[in-house]
Amino acid sequence: MTRRNYLCQITAPHFCAGLVVRRGARDMTVIQAAPILRYMIAWSASRVRPYCERKGWDLEIIEIFDDPQEHSQNP
């Protein structure tokens, strides 16, 4: 099974930054984040989305891509 990663953009009044989220068996998890959002690494999507809503930030999926590590392991 190919893992899917999602590039997400968070837009706030004072910054715009990205997260990479991986779909797991039960939930989606943040695996990479811009420095301003690094505290979100390992958060689930079900935690990120309401957090952004409370802050008044926009969250959108920009791109969906396959996990590049899987491709390097399976030539």
Image (spheres, rainbow, N blue to C red):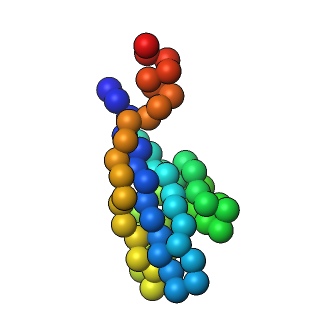
Query: Is residue 28 visible in the rendered structure shown here?
Result: no
**x and y, in percent, of residue 66 in the image:** 38, 36
Please report the residue visible at 36 percent of the width from the left and 66 percent of the height from the top. 60
**x and y, in percent, of residue 30 in the image:** 51, 53
Query: Is residue 3 visible in the rendered structure shown here?
Result: yes
Quadrant housing the N terminus: top left
Please report the residue visible at 47 percent of the width from the left and 75 percent of the height from the top. 11
- Left or right, 69 with reference to 38: left
Q: Residue furthest top?
A: 75
Quadrant housing the C terminus: top left
Please report the residue visible at 47 percent of the width from the left and 31 percent of the height from the top. 68
**x and y, in percent, of residue 9 in the image:** 45, 65
Q: How many marks are shown on the rendered structure?
A: 0
Please report the residue visible at 65 percent of the width from the left and 68 percent of the height from the top. 36
Q: Nearer the viewer, residue 46 or 38?
A: 38
**x and y, in percent, of residue 48 in the image:** 47, 66
On screen, residue 14 above or below 51: below
Q: Dividing the picture into quarters, in which one does residue 2 lie? A: top left
